Amino acid sequence: MSAEPRLVSTAAALVIGDELLSGKIREENIYELAKVLRALGIRLARVNLVGDDLETIAREVKALSEAHDVVFTSGGVGPTHDDITIDGVAEAFGVKASVHPDVEALLRRAYGERYHEGHQRMALVPLGADLISSDEVPWPTIVMHNVWVLPGVPEVFRMKLLLVKAHLTGTQCYLSRAVFTQMDEGDLKPLLDQVVGNHAEVAIGSYPRWRSPDYKTKVTFDASSQALLQPALDEFLALLPKGEPQRVE
């Protein structure tokens, strides 16, 4: 891949695993991915969760790849029978997946005398894919056109995000502020309606929290510049009832 970060605007994620759909494992990776993409200025527009079915994975990868600048898969890249993400990505682009000699060599060095044929699935790479790595993340990551194939193990997934930061950059700027109030959402609604009506270019959200001594409703303000964000924030703060306890971050 190019040494210069690729400029992208929209992203999608495909999370793969029967264990997630059955509740056996808690999904943790999308939260981490969303934070990284937002910091880069890339809008995460869609997240799909599917089971370990080859045709479904291939169909989803193809559709997401065509509709978004970049796609991230999470899960299904190990050595076992249900690790079929590589095959699904290959099928999505009409190519075969085969054992890559460089990846196999890494596996042999890593496992030494314990290496056997059962580990070989971890060396599968779709034909035409790029392998990217760094000094910090030496194990190669597969990038097939605009699809990044990432592992499902949260610790390894987070490590691989270092490569995403190095190779991708976004087209958008996100500034965000939050106000923590002791007001119910229903009481905040007329205030929010007024601010939303006056500041169409600011994304405003409200998020209630039950039985929290800290706050009742968190109100967020997101915009592409401080010049847009600050007036909306100031107007909202001015509309809050006098004496309303609040925290602004």
Image (tube, rainbow, N blue to C red):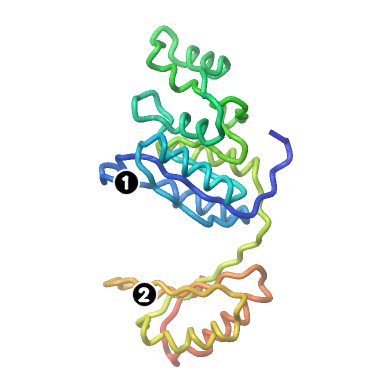
Q: What residue sits 26% from the left and 46% below the top?
A: 23
Q: Quadrant of residue 165?
A: top right
Instruction: Please tell me whether mark 2 or mark 1 is closer to you in this view.
Output: 1
Q: Quadrant of residue 167?
A: top right
**Residue situated furthest top in the rendering:** 113
Q: The disc labelled 2 sits on which kind of residue?
A: Tyr
The reply, left or right, for residue 247 in relation to residue 216 is right
The reply, left or right, for residue 158 in relation to residue 163 is left
For residue 244, above or below residue 76: below
Q: The disc labelled 1 sits on which kind of residue?
A: Arg
Q: What residue sits 45% from the left and 49% below the top?
A: 30
The reply, left or right, for residue 129 in relation to residue 241 is right
Give the image location of residue 239, x and y in percent: 50, 90
- Residue under label 1: 26
- Residue under label 2: 215
Quick one: SS at disc 1? loop
Q: Residues within 10 Å of mark 2 (few under 14, many from 20)?
A: some
